Amino acid sequence: MSLIIAYIGKKGCVMASDKRRIGYFGNKEQLNALESELYSGKIKTDEEFKKKADEYGISIKLTEDATKITTVGNCVRGEVTTKKVFETYRKRIYGTTMGYQIVELSGSETVSREAGEKAIIVFGNKFAKQEAEKLINKKWKPSLSLKYMGDIFEEILTEISRKTPTIGNTFDVLIKQPKFNKSEAQRHLNISIDKDIKVLSKFRQKLQEDLIQKNKEIALADKIINKAQTVVDLDGNKIPSKETETETEVLNSKTQAFDGNWKQIAKPNETVFMFSDHNHVELGDKVVIQDEKLCLKKDKSNLKCDIILCSL
């Protein structure tokens, strides 16, 4: 869905991209049919795209907030992604003065890595790439300054955005022009790319850890006790305070306790603290959850606790 145009040469590197992001929701077969028409260039405008999506029963969301190019050290990086069911494939171009590398990644694992010295490189779908290459041949000249090249690339993106909704109408342009010869360029690229991929790996690891934690929270949330049942037996000494009474209670064999971060603080048959605004709590009283309220079974008087009670 992206279009990225990059010049790499002795003057430096200039890269331009659109910022469009397209979200889809619907039947996979219908989506494939819609994308086939979209990437062939048959669909010309956002209005046609939305109408055709409705015909296929696909919900779409168009936004202009994607960051497809960025700086990494003394390089500019452009990235296009393809998301599969279980993995994300990335194709990246890293460019600087007198050197570039094209890196393909599956997740954060490097699939291929290709190096070069000078080039104009275009990433995008087939239709957008063909249109970009025609316009580059027509408009670009090697004598242009990097600033003017960036302006030309932005003009090209604008023209193509009028022919296909795969390209948005807002753009980013970045320039880097350090003083490198070709060996210095590749050395800097190697260092910068290796660091960048490590950052990606750590980011993906963090996402996986967050997902595991979120799944754990969802699983535990389903076990939160909010229906009438006995959760603890009062089995300890009363510890009086000025305004409330603190009770030590033993969880029954089917109940566990967690703090607000879902860290287990008490297992079944272990002790927890609860607080009462009344002074008539006695040893042997049953504590229950009824109508989503923690209370004494005998008179329904409320209790308080700073824990989450869950069934096993």
Image (cartoon, rainbow, N blue to C red):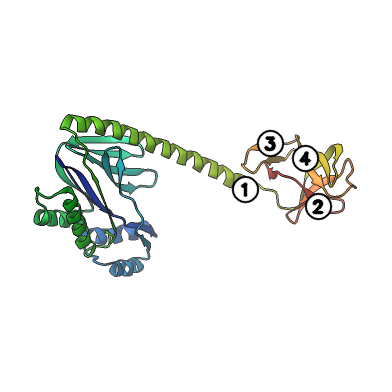
**How far apart are the alpha carbons under marks 3 and 2?**
22 Å
Circle 4 — which element? Answer: strand
Mark whose residue sits in front, 1 or 3: 3
Q: Earlier in the sequence, mark 1 or mark 4?
A: 1
**How far apart are the alpha carbons under marks 3 and 4?**
11 Å
Q: What residue type is disc 2 on?
A: Asn
The spot of residue 23 in percent (x, y) is 37, 58
Residue underneath mark 4: 273
Residue 133 vs residue 223: left or right?
left
Q: Earlier in the sequence, mark 1 or mark 3?
A: 1
Q: What residue type is disc 3 on?
A: Ile
Residue underneath mark 2: 302
CB contact under 8 Å: marks 3 and 4: no
| Residue 265 circle label | 3
The spot of residue 171 in percent (x, y) is 28, 56
Q: What residue type is disc 4 on?
A: Phe
Residue 280 vs residue 183: left or right?
right
Residue 177 vs residue 267: left or right?
left
